[in-house]
Image (tube, rainbow, N blue to C red):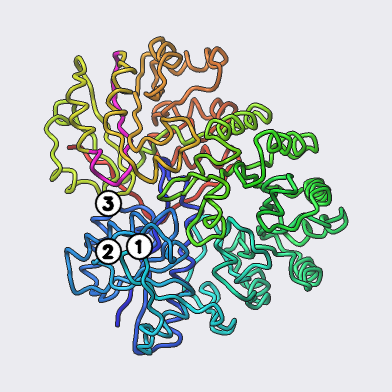
């Protein structure tokens, strides 16, 4: 049997997801199968296809590679795309076996509510357990009805033994990421049973892989710059102190990152954590309302947690402190007090706002009637309202936090237009306005190779908004995200573009995941206007909302930009052409070092130089994509 594992990412317009999408589950199961079942061979989808290419490209790769079984590792961010990909794959080859597993597949998953005849097997539980039973032809013993489908469920007392877990990096089935980072799973299971979390409910026992794996990677893998240690509570083990000592003795310079509980951490321990290499940590506080925490099943001494957080911060560790509005028995007023308290303790810059998710398989799903909870019936399952919270309450709390900390959630505002003419994959196309009007669905299928695609449209005459609507309607029916860039020296009608964007909106994950963000953040089509006329740019920069104006910096306007930069309320979004880059380098380092999302470049080399000179982390991917002319 030749198996392929697929674990697709949550995409966004700016490729900001790349660093976080590690195919860890795919690599772990590939290693497990190949190490234990020599009669079978497993692989997982190559990095470039996983993170960048469109579904059509992925399907062609699968059909041309001779896989007879395709296994999808499902999470809330990829289940819908996986289902559509699987359906189209089955249409192309009815003999391919499709297997769906992962955290998103459980007894009350939305994916199982309607019949999915193209999926051969849904299973819930650990992948190693399933494939052990599957290859022994015993999996049918564990079938239960689920919605309109059947589900294979791992019994709760059959957690796999720790020595069956194949750590993929150690077994050479997973490379470090282009930025030099790697994920290592240290712990399966969690000592806590929080009502909103599926992780602990899905695992009966806590199992730990060899900590020596991490020590050996630091010692021998010189390319590694950062290790994300996957452990829900790293300091929950009684060997925590000894492990810190081992790491300190290495005198290494690898950045370490993990999750832990802040409760009980004194300053001396915090310093030790820092010296061990932990330069950043994730800590879930959720709320300081003790009644809400108790209802959720969290045992927490909130006063001690705050002291621990302060000690960690004082030791020099970068913190990400998760807070969750909407939890049962919490209230908007109490949550506002949580924000105020954490800010007053000097922790405001570390706060991350996560609206409550009502995940399938969690205990909180059983409490929705009691707390009058309404939520999205598809991923990401955000709460919409409850007995104590309305949607407006949650929006107000988000705004309250942003105003109090002056930290505002932003999205990447500038598409990447660098590329290579020799690339096999096309990420964008340049065309005239008249050519745009002649596009068809078949033409789109032919040219779109990436999951985020750009159209650069040259406008020389008056704009026909009916033609734009027709073109955007074609894009509406696709699953990719789009950047549409009008190169235009006349002012566009922002209201007309809003009406078009509103008309072509549809329900999808990208829209739902931005439920608590500004409306335009959830648009699958982002609209830009590249303009060279500096005076017109200044005017539209203050007038547009739905169109993102971008100043194309050329020899004609570079002097004005340098002279007028301080007249803008915030640094403007710019596109730097190669002809002005040498002259502009010191200027953009001064003004754009903290605003990478507001600058893009004609040349990839110029971008690299800017990032390196501004002390940023430049990631050089071992491949490029092209932008074609129509």
Is there CB contact under 8 Å for labels 3 and 2? no
Q: Residues within 10 Å of mark 1 (few under 14, many from 20)?
A: some
Residue 309 % position (x, y): 78, 48
Reading the image, the residue beneath label 1 is 112
Residue 298 % position (x, y): 70, 57
Q: Give the structural element (helix, strand or loop) at label 1.
A: helix
Say the numbered circle drawn on residue 116: 2
Reading the image, the residue beneath label 3 is 425
Using the rendered view, name the quadrant where residue 266 is placed: bottom right
Q: Which residue is painted at 61% across and 38% down in the image? A: 388
Magenta span: 475-490
The answer to which of 619 and 259 lies nearer the viewer is 259
Q: Is residue 614 above or below residue 318?
A: above
The answer to which of 530 and 585 lies nearer the viewer is 530
Q: Which residue is painted at 62% across and 45% down in the image? A: 324
Q: Give the structural element (helix, strand or loop) at label 3.
A: loop
**Is 325 on the left or on the right of 629, as rendered?**
right
Dot 3 or dot 2: first in sequence order is 2
Whole-number angstrom distance, CA of label 2 to CA of label 1: 7 Å
Using the rendered view, name the quadrant where residue 145 is placed: bottom left
Q: Quadrant of the C terminus?
A: top left
Is there CB contact under 8 Å for labels 2 and 1? yes
Residue 320 lies in the magenta stretch: no
């Amino acid at each position: 049997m030749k198996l392929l594992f697929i674990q697709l990412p949550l995409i966004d317009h700016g490729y900001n997801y790349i660093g976080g999408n590690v195919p860890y589950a795919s690599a772990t199961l590939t290693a497990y199968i190949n190490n234990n079942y020599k009669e079978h061979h497993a692989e997982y989808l190559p990095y470039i296809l996983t993170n960048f290419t469109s579904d059509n490209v992925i399907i062609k790769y699968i059909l041309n590679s001779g896989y007879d079984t395709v296994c999808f590792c499902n999470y809330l961010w990829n289940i819908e795309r996986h289902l559509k990909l699987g359906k189209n794959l089955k249409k192309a080859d009815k003999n391919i076996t499709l297997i769906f597993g992962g955290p998103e597949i459980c007894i009350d998953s939305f994916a199982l509510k309607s019949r999915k005849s193209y999926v051969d097997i849904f299973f819930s539980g650990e992948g190693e357990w399933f494939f052990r039973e599957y290859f022994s032809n015993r999996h049918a013993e564990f079938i239960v009805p689920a919605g309109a489908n059947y589900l294979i469920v791992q019994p709760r007392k059959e957690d796999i033994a720790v020595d069956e877990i194949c750590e993929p990096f150690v077994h050479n089935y997973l490379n470090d990421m282009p930025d030099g980072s790697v994920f290592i799973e240290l712990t399966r299971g969690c000592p806590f049973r929080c009502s909103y979390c599926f992780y602990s409910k899905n695992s009966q026992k806590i199992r730990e892989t060899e900590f020596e794996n991490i020590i050996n990677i630091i010692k021998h893998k010189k390319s590694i710059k950062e290790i994300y240690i996957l452990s829900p509570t790293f300091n929950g083990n009684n060997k925590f102190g000894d492990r810190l000592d081992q790491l300190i003795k290495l005198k290494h310079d690898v950045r370490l990152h993990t999750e832990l509980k802040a409760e009980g951490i004194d300053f001396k321990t915090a310093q030790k954590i820092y010296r061990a290499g932990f330069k950043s940590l994730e800590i879930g506080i959720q709320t300081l309302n003790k009644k809400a925490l108790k209802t959720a099943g969290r045992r927490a001494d909130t006063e001690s947690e705050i002291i621990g957080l302060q000690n960690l911060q004082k030791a020099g560790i970068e913190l990400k402190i998760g807070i969750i509005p909407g939890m049962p028995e919490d209230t908007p007023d109490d949550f506002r007090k949580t924000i105020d308290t954490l800010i007053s303790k000097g922790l405001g810059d570390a706060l991350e706002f996560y609206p409550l998710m009502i995940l399938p398989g969690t205990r909180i799903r059983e409490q929705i009637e009691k707390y009058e909870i309404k939520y999205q019936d598809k991923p990401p399952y955000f709460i919409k309202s409850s007995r104590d919270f309305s949607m407006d309450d949650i929006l107000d709390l988000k705004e309250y936090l942003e105003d109090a900390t002056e930290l505002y959630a932003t999205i990447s505002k500038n598409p990447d237009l660098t590329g290579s003419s020799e690339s096999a994959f096309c990420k964008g196309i340049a065309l005239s306005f008249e050519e745009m009007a002649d596009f068809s669905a078949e033409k789109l299928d032919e040219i779109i190779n990436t999951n985020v695609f750009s159209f650069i449209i040259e406008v020389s005459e008056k704009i026909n908004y009916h033609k734009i609507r027709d073109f955007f309607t074609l894009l509406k029916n696709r699953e990719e995200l789009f950047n549409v860039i009008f190169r235009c020296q006349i002012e566009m009608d922002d209201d007309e573009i809003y009406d078009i964007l509103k008309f072509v909106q549809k329900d999808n994950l990208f829209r739902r995941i931005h439920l608590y963000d500004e409306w335009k953040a959830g648009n699958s089509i982002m609209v830009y206007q590249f303009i060279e006329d500096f005076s017109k740019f200044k005017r539209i920069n203050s007038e547009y909302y739905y169109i993102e104006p971008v100043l194309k910096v050329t020899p004609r306007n570079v002097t004005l930009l340098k002279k007028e930069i301080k007249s803008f309320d915030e640094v403007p979004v710019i596109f730097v052409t190669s002809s002005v880059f040498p002259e502009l380098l010191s200027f953009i380092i001064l003004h754009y070092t903290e605003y990478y999302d507001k600058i893009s470049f004609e040349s990839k080399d110029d971008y690299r130089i800017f990032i390196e000179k501004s002390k940023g982390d430049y990631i050089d991917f071992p491949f490029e994509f092209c932008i074609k002319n129509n």
